Amino acid sequence: MLIAEVSDKFDLSQDTLRYYERIGLIPRVNRNKSGIRDYTEEDCRWVEFVKCMRGVGLPIEVLIEYVELFQQGDETLEVRKQLLVEQHKQLLSRMEEMKTVMERLQYKISAYEQTIGEKEKTLNRTSP
């Protein structure tokens, strides 16, 4: 699959895909005889994984470390698992923080709705 197709499929720019490859966020993509990137299904799974993990805020550095460990083989299974467990804990913590912020926002929105509702009642009473 050509980079343009992968870009469209995962809604990532071609520059982003090249960058991810250059920094080791995804393993090196094979190239055809013309030197053009030729993404395999496995490459696409890496792109999908990285997009998902970045989408929830995992740092690039953590993902690079994960890819490097993965490439070292099965002897890194436990280390990789621990890396993901730690990121899971951090994500849960951020979700709790977001929940608190969402509740505060909802309270503020409700307060504004009440204020606007009261103003409208006042306007309706003073209208001819």
Image: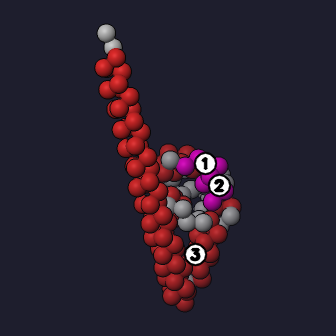
Instruction: Give the camera-side residue of 54 and 116.
Output: 116
The residue tagged with tag 2: helix, strand or loop? helix
Q: Residue at the spot x=60%, y=66% of the render?
A: 59
Region in magenta? 12-20
Task: Report x, y in % for residue 78.
Answer: 51, 88
Residue topped by disc 2: 18
Instruction: From the viewer's side, name the closer residue of 63 and 10.
Output: 63
Distance from disc 1 to disc 3, alpha carbons, whole Å, reads 23 Å
Q: Residues within 10 Å of mark 2 (few under 14, many from 20)?
A: some
In what quadrant of the picture does the C terminus appear? top left
Judging depth in this view, the residue of 82 and 19 nearest the camera is 82
* The furthest residue to the bottom: 75
Q: Position of residue 87 (x, y in %)?
A: 52, 74
**Mark 1 vs mark 3: which is more N-terminal?**
1
Q: Secondary structure at mark 1?
A: helix
The residue at 42%/39% (across/down) is 112
In the picture, the disc for residue 14 is: 1
Q: Amino acid under label 1?
A: Gln
Q: Whole-percent x and y of residue 1?
A: 51, 53
Q: How many numbered discs?
A: 3
Disc 2 + disc 1, Cβ < 8 Å: yes
Q: CA distance from mark 2 to mark 1?
A: 6 Å
Residue carrying label 3: 66
| Residue 94, label in figure | none
Observer-nearest residue: 23 or 125?
Answer: 125
Label 3 is placed on what type of residue?
A: Tyr
Foreground label between 2 and 3: 3
